[in-house]
Image (spheres, rainbow, N blue to C red):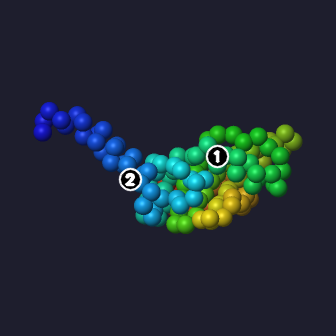
Amino acid sequence: MKGIRHLLPLMVMGVILAAAYHPGLPSLPSHNTHNSLVTTTSASCQNLVLPANVTGFLEEAHADHGAGQLQRPIYYGRCGGSYFALATFVSPSLGKTDQPETFEEKEGGSWKDTGGSGGSVCHSSVPVEMTQVWGLCSK
């Protein structure tokens, strides 16, 4: 056993990856806009790796709220049956006023821009537990 101890982290990662991509797991997203890995979790919220296609959905959802260049970092995760994101858009005329924007997608629905956070993500439309998992608000 002592000789294979160094392989334990690789074996654990293999189990995690296998579980993340197993099609029968009910806790993973069921539609293809969210093919992502869990990076941090709490009792009901999970920080997820942002899939490349979600940035386009966020830009589309934000289009009704004005023009702006999407910047990183983008926070992305899931609480219960909804996905949440925080993203900053820099407007040519307003800069970063009222940012970051908050977004929600209910399971099977489309992304909605739920408004600017007013600079206070801990008191926004994103559940505080989600912002805690992201490390943005204290517990």
What x and y, as percent, mark residue 54? 64, 49
Q: Earlier in the sequence, mark 2 or mark 1?
A: 2
Q: Residue at x 74, y 45 (%)?
A: 89
Q: Residues within 10 Å of mark 2 (few under 14, many from 20)?
A: some
Judging depth in this view, the residue of 82 and 24 nearest the camera is 24
User: Is residue 57 found left or right of 48 in the rendered image?
Assistant: right
Q: At label 1, which amino acid type do we have? A: Asn
Q: Residues within 10 Å of mark 1 (few under 14, many from 20)?
A: few
User: Is residue 102 found left or right of 5 in the rendered image?
Assistant: right
Q: Residue at x 76, y 40 (%)?
A: 69
> The N terminus lies in which quarter of the figure?
top left
Q: Is residue 117 above or below residue 39?
A: below
Furthest toward the right, the residue is: 93
Q: Residue at x 48, y 59 (%)?
A: 28
What x and y, as percent, mark residue 38? 46, 51
Helix, strand or loop for disc 1: helix
Tag of residue 97: none
Judging depth in this view, the residue of 67 and 22 nearest the camera is 22
Q: At label 2, which amino acid type do we have? A: Ala
User: Is residue 32 found left or right of 66 in the rendered image?
Assistant: left
Judging depth in this view, the residue of 20 and 40 nearest the camera is 20
Q: Residue at x 87, y 42 (%)?
A: 93
Residue 83 visible (yes or no): yes
Q: Is residue 84 above or below residue 14?
A: below
Q: Which residue is mark 1?
A: 53
Q: Which residue is mark 2?
A: 19
Distance of label 2 from label 1 (alpha carbons)? 22 Å
User: Is residue 60 found left or right of 42 in the rendered image?
Assistant: right
Helix, strand or loop for disc 2: helix
What x and y, as percent, mark residue 5? 19, 37
